[in-house]
Image (cartoon, rainbow, N blue to C red):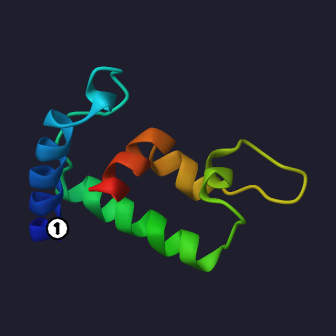
Amino acid sequence: MENLADWTNTRAKRKINNTIRRKQNKITDSDVTLDGMNAFVGCLLSMGNVRMPNYTMYWRQKTKLFSITGVNGISSEQRFKDLDSC
């Protein structure tokens, strides 16, 4: 997990320097920690167990049929997207 966090941080630094999103201030430039990486992998595992038609539905507050509190309580949608892309 430590190696995964280090590789993600290295990739994120390269990506931040080469992206338009940096100018839009949408990407977070804080390094992922070991706890953050564990939380990210936990989100992925939860998403694998509880399937939704599209991953943005995990961050919706409550729908009439579903309420997924674990994923949206662990990470913001933007932070998840940033880690997933790296």
Tell whether 29 sits left or right of 68. Answer: left
Q: Residues within 10 Å of mark 1 (few under 14, many from 20)?
A: few
Percent from the top left, x then y, of residue 82?
A: 35, 46
What residue occupies the far bottom of the structure in this picture?
Answer: 49
- Residue drawn at (54%, 71%), measured in percent from left and top? 46
Q: Where, quadrant-wise, is the C terminus in this rendering?
A: bottom left
User: Where 8 sits versus 22, above or below?
Assistant: below
User: Where 37 sits versus 20, above or below?
Assistant: below
Q: Where, quadrant-wise, is the N terminus in this rendering?
A: bottom left
Percent from the top left, x then y, of residue 80?
A: 42, 50
- Residue drawn at (63%, 54%), measured in percent from left and top? 58
Residue 21, image quadrant = top left
Q: Which residue is the site of mark 1?
A: 4
> Along the line of sight, which residue is nearer the eye, 51 or 27?
27
Q: Amino acid at mark 1?
A: Leu
Tell whether 55 sits left or right of 27. Answer: right
Tell whether 60 sits left or right of 64. Answer: left
> Along the line of sight, which residue is nearer the eye, 71 or 23?
23
